[in-house]
Amino acid sequence: MAANIKTAYVDYSDGDTTFEAYIAHPADGGKHASVLVAHDWSGLNQGTRARTEQMAALGYTAFAMDVYGKGVRGDEMGDNSALMGPFLEDRALLKKRLLAGLEAAKAHDAVDASRIGAMGYCFGGLCVLDMARAAAPDIKGVVSFHGIFMPPGLGPQGKISAKVLILHGWDDPMAPPDHVVGVAKEMTEAGADWQLHAYGHAMHAFTAVGADAPERGIRYDASADRRSWAAMRNFFEEVLG
């Protein structure tokens, strides 16, 4: 971890449920543009914390949201369908928890609430797209890394005001070409300012170092990882200043 950043766990709540976010920010005592980080299906584990620290090293206040609840964590290398499944089935509940995370981030002393974006990986990619779909005015832009594209089905989609960057592995079986066309059509119809970068031969989890299960469409891809990170940095420099 870089010496010039501070990290902490922050409790917040939604109704009777307590959540535990992880925050990292420059150690200068000021407010900074903030990037919310949405975790993958395993919960707020080491990989998400590492990404949060990387974003802080770039000068952002990074706030890793907790969708599952304090202490509810899966196995980063295991099957976490039982944790993620209820939120895929109840996208209204997912939306509620994501917006609770946004409100908690806005209240933090190191966050410039006028400059907030969001990024997420896998399940987290779906989460940040849902934040854009929720049309929260505080979210200026979202970045989905190898995310899932299925719309939430919560009624007619209003205008999407957040800018959207989708970083996608073309050989990802969890987001096949018809889903890619579908999300592009959805974003266009919602009036979003959107981009989609597709990386040839890249599979699901292309940013996850060590991922190597090509029979399931899962594999790390160093080139796609590097290119997608550069695209994300350029995007947030434009959107958050």
Image (cartoon, grey):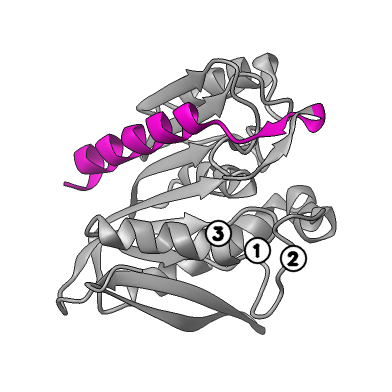
Residue 176, image x, y percentages: 70, 20
Q: Secondary structure at mark 1?
A: loop
Q: Residue 97: which quarter of the image?
A: bottom right
Identify the mark at residue 156; answer none if there is no mark.
none
Residue at 69% in and 58% down: 76
Residue at 60% in and 34% down: 156
Report how far apart the C-alphas of labels 1 and 3 lie in the structure.
Answer: 10 Å
Q: According to the image, label 3 marks what residue?
A: 47
Which of the two residues, 57 or 3, is positioned nearer the viewer here? 3
Q: According to the image, label 1 marks what residue?
A: 43
Report how far apart the C-alphas of labels 3 and 2 lie in the structure.
Answer: 12 Å
Residue 88, image x, y percentages: 75, 48
Residue 30 to residue 150: above or below: below
Residue at 80% in and 32% down: 216
Say which amino acid is labelled 2: Gly
Which of the two residues, 94 or 78, is positioned nearer the viewer here? 78
Say which amino acid is labelled 3: Gly
Residue 39, image x, y percentages: 57, 57
User: Which residues are drawn in magenta?
Assistant: 215-241
Q: According to the image, label 2 marks what residue?
A: 74
Q: How many marks?
A: 3
